[in-house]
Each structure stands twice: as C-alpha cells, then as structure tokens.
Image (cartoon, helix red, strand yellow):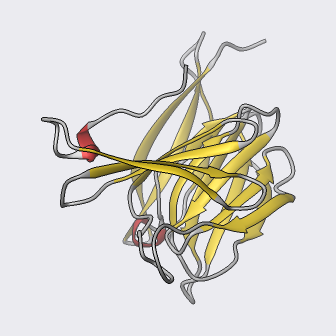
Amino acid sequence: MHGPDVLVRENRQQDGRYWPAMLVFDGLTGRLRHVVGLPEERRTDRDPLLVAGHLVVAWRDARGAPLLTAHTLATGEAAWRRSLPGDGRVSALVRSDRADELVVLQEDGYLGTYGISDGKPRGRTRIYVGEGRGAWPFHQTTLLADAERVFLMPRSPRPPAQVGAWDRATGKLLWVTPWDGEERNPGRSALGLT
C-alpha cells in the first residue's frame, strides 16, 4: 500500500545533456517510486497534465508534428501515444466533466476529444472566430469544457479581452463577448465554471 503520488519536475543530466523528468514519490513514505522521462524542453508545448492516474504530455516530434503521450503513474510506463491533426502546437488541454475524457485545443483551431485511459479519439472539430483561418489565434488559451460546450479565453496583448463558447460537436460559435474592465491582461484573469 502506498500514499498519494507526489510529483516533482526536474532536469536530469545524462551523457552531458539535460532532459526534463517527472519524479513520482510515495506520499506516505517519501520513497521515489519511479521517474517518467519527458520530451526535450524545446519540444514540449504545455506543462504536463496530471489526470486520472495518467501524466499527459503535449509535445512535438523531430519533424514538428504535434503529439500527445500519456504515462501511467502507478508504473511510470508509457500508456499511449497519439498524433494530432494539423500542425498547430497544443494551446490548452483539460479534463472534461465527462468521465475518462481529455479536451485538447491546438493553436490552429483543432479541438479534439480523447480517452484518458487509451488515447483514442472520440471527436474532432475546428473552431474559428471572425473571418478566415486564424482570425482569433488560440495561443496561450484558457480552456474549460462541460458536456456540450468549450469556453475559451485567449491571452491577447491588446484589449479588449474576449470570452467565447463553442459547441463541442460541431465547432459552431455560440457566443463571444469582449470585456473591457480594469483588468486588461487576460493572462492574469481567471475563467471558471460553477
């Protein structure tokens, strides 16, 4: 029997090179259970997401193609690997309120749903705001998801900030609202569901 997992991210040295890793410690004893190696820092798109006993990492392969990988925390072994569509880096990934479901948004507007336990695709669409591809770039975006919709707040260097909602199945824009309060930098603001 062991306690809750405690994760620590560190850079490790091997053969004169540094590579990032997640160290998994037993929460009751403090013993190191295993080390999960991560892709090189320059190829990692987002911070790893700890969800449902898995550590999910968004990164890019040597050709720059976007990927997701998951490691099982109980063993540290790779659980699955999934290539993503398009060429956009992963902007955000969150757990859906549906069981065993991960929602992934890429900068080029691809919105995908994947199983956490097996990485299998469950749905994919593309979302836009405005006219033409990339009218609202999804870079450093705050993402939330419920059963039918996704809610996004992209980080933008210029006000007004925008908050929008899209249908998860069709990618249809449901609404978008600029907000022009005193807090001008949405990167320091919060977006939450109640």
Looking at the picture, does residue 164 appear above or below residue 120? Answer: above
Name the residue located 72 percent from the left edge and 67 percent from the top edge: 125
Name the residue located 81 percent from the left edge and 56 percent from the top edge: 119
Q: What is the x, y in percent for residue 40?
A: 47, 68
**Which one is in front, 30 or 71?**
71
In the image, 70: left or right of 40? Answer: right
Looking at the picture, does residue 160 appear above or below residue 180? Answer: below
Q: What is the x, y in percent for residue 171?
A: 68, 62
Image quadrant where one finds the C terminus:
top right
Name the residue located 66 percent from the left edge and 60 percent from the top edge: 172
**Which one is in front, 31 or 86?**
86
Asked which quadrant contains residue 38, the reply is: bottom right
In the image, 8: left or right of 101? Answer: left
Looking at the picture, does residue 114 appear above or below residue 67? Answer: above
**Which one is in front, 24 or 57?**
57
Q: What is the x, y in percent for residue 35?
A: 60, 45
How many labels, in total?
0
Image quadrant where one finds the N terminus:
top right
Furthest residue toward left: 182
Asked which quadrant contains residue 149, the reply is: top right
Furthest residue toward bottom: 63
